[in-house]
Structure formats: C-alpha cells, structure tokens
Image (cartoon, helix red, strand yellow):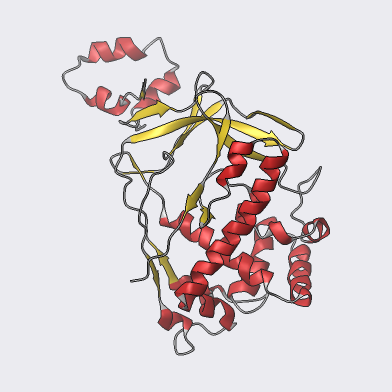
Amino acid sequence: GKIVRYDIERFIEDRNVPFRDKENLFIGKLPRDTVKSLRNRMRARYSLIPASGGHLGKEVREAIKMPGDVPYLPGSSVKGSIRTALTWNLFYHLTEEQKEVALNAAGRESRNQFKAQILENLAFRGGTGGDAKADAMKALFVADSGNLGTLELRLYDLYTARSGRAERDNRGPFALEAIPPGSSFDIDLKIDSHFLSRSGNYSPSENPGIVMRKPESFYVGLKSFGRFVGNVEQEFYSSMGLKKVARFFEQDDLLPIGFGTGWNAKTIGTFLEPAQIRQAKIQFFRGAPPPKSRRVALDGSGNAVFPLGWARCELVVR
C-alpha cells in the first residue's frame, strides 16, 4: 500500500553492486543525459502513502525537507504568511484617502516586481518611499519548524475548481507530497522590541511596531486575516457544491502558509474592488480579476475534500 522511492545515489555508490550491474540497469534503457544526471541527484528514502487513487500521474511535486529527507516548514514561508497577514490588517485600517495614494503609486510603477513594494512601504516603513532598512518586519525572527516526527508523507492527486465547473488539474496530471492532516509542529517566533522602539533603529509609522510589540494584537492580526480569507474561500466552495471542503473553513485560528492557498491568501486582494485591482495593475492579462480557480486534494474515492496549505495556529507567549 505504499510507493517507495529508490535511493539512486546510494545504489550508484554501493561497492557491493558490481559496476557491470549498474551499467546494465541504466545504459541503453535511459537517455544518456539522464544517466549522467543520476550521479548528481538525491532521491528520498522515505515511503509515500497514496491518499488518492489511480490518477497520480508521472510527476510528483515534492515537499521541502531537512537533511535526512525529513519534511519541515521553513521559517521564511511562515514569516511570509505573517507579513501578508499584517500587511492586510494595516492596509485594511487605512483611510480611503491613504489607500488611494498607495494604489495610485502602485499603479504608476511600471515594473511588476515592485508594485507590491509600494504597499509594503506604506504598511511597514512609514510611507510610499520608505527605507527597507527601517522595515518593521526586520524585528521578527521566525525559526524553521522541527521535524514532524514522521518519514511518511501523503501523496495527493489535485483537483482544480473554477467558477461554474470543476476538473482535475489541467497542468498535470501530477501528485503533491503533503504533510498528513492532523500533523503538529512548533515554531519559535522572536521579536526584537528594541529595534521597534524609537531608541532603536525603527523610526517610521508606529502602527507595525505597536502590533508586533503586543502579543494579543499580533495574534488577532493573524486570526482576522485567516478568518476573512477563510470566509471568502468557504463561500466559493459552497457555491461549487464542494461541501466537505467548505466545512474545513468553519475552524478557528486558521492561517494560510503552504503551497495551494491561492491568490487571496498571498495578497490584500480580498477587500479590494475589481476597479481597485485594475488600478493597481495586478489584474491578469485577460479575463476576470483573480482568483480564477482553487486547487484541492482528492481522497481515495476521488472526492475533493482538503484545501491545500492551511494550518491552525496557536500563539504561546513565553
């Protein structure tokens, strides 16, 4: 009942396997470039349990792992999720005039990679022309999670839901390695309050500093973002008839972290009007404003049951 990955590197380096046997296995059966690349590729040594059946495709999208092939959550990914949540909260509480200033500035930015930076400057650096050295998020340290205590990941087939229809992911078929539902992990967060004080290096708007200096407001900021996006997602899945997926978002304390949470979870777009999205020039090149679709995981019966990349969070203050 498991899919087992062969450790090609170990096989090639195994002195107990005659070189001729290695040649016979690879030469003539695989392209020359593939044979050459095998010496430079590491393959996982753990087992994969298929969580959905029969349509797993030829490609597997792998999870990030520690040395020893143990899955974990990178602190940088978690910090990125926190940054988005705080950006959303801070921007949400701006006046309409301040929002217009930020969106107009972003709309005038010709380089797509810097459009969001205009909004981040306003949220964390005290103005649309803020200095990155004074970014409030520099005060936040997020460690990588410890390992999850398991060498077994679930292998899910993916399903794309679009308004009006639903289908298997049309970019595949591919399967996704995922941490099993119900897994738990600890991540250390540290905030340098000195940096956020006026006697430290932080001098712009007080808003981000206040939010991060008070654990209760920091946690409320994360929860309010997760709840708002979760409500939007729940409404979408309900409209598609995917009731099991919609019920997932009835939980409290949800935070979008991983792959597959979608455009709403990675932007402040949930409270922007379509006209504002166009104004900031972050609309897709054609069609309706994003998001156009969502991706969910299938269970063994082919039912769409899990949204991707969401976790329940609890803040423990020490």
Indicate the position of residue 42 as horizontal and vertical percent values. 34, 33
Q: Split into 4 quadrants, where in the image is the N terminus?
A: top left
Query: Residue 234 vs residue 188: left or right?
Result: right
Query: Residue at left 51%, top 52%?
Result: 257
Residue 83 seen in render: no
Q: Please identify the quarter of the rendering in which residue 288 is found.
A: top right
Question: In the image, is residue 134 above or below residue 273?
Answer: below
**Where, by quadrant of the figure, is residue 48 drawn?**
top left
Does residue 257 show up?
A: yes
Q: Measured along the vertical axis of the image, is residue 1 above or below residue 317? A: above
* Residue depicted at x 35% and y 25%: 5
Count of all numbered marks drawn on residues in the image: 0
Observer-nearest residue: 159 or 305?
Answer: 305
Quadrant into which the C terminus falls: bottom left
Check the image and name the residue furthest to the right. 275
Picture quadrant where residue 285 is located: top right
Relative image position of residue 147 (x, y in whole percent):
31, 47
Q: Is residue 165 left or right of residue 147?
A: right
User: Furthest residue to the bottom?
Assistant: 199
- Residue 299 to residue 275: above or below: above
Q: x, y percentage for residue 230?
A: 61, 52
- In the image, residue 294 lies at what x, y percent? 65, 40
Q: Nearer the viewer, residue 101 or 22?
A: 101
Viewer-side residue, 234 vs 190: 234
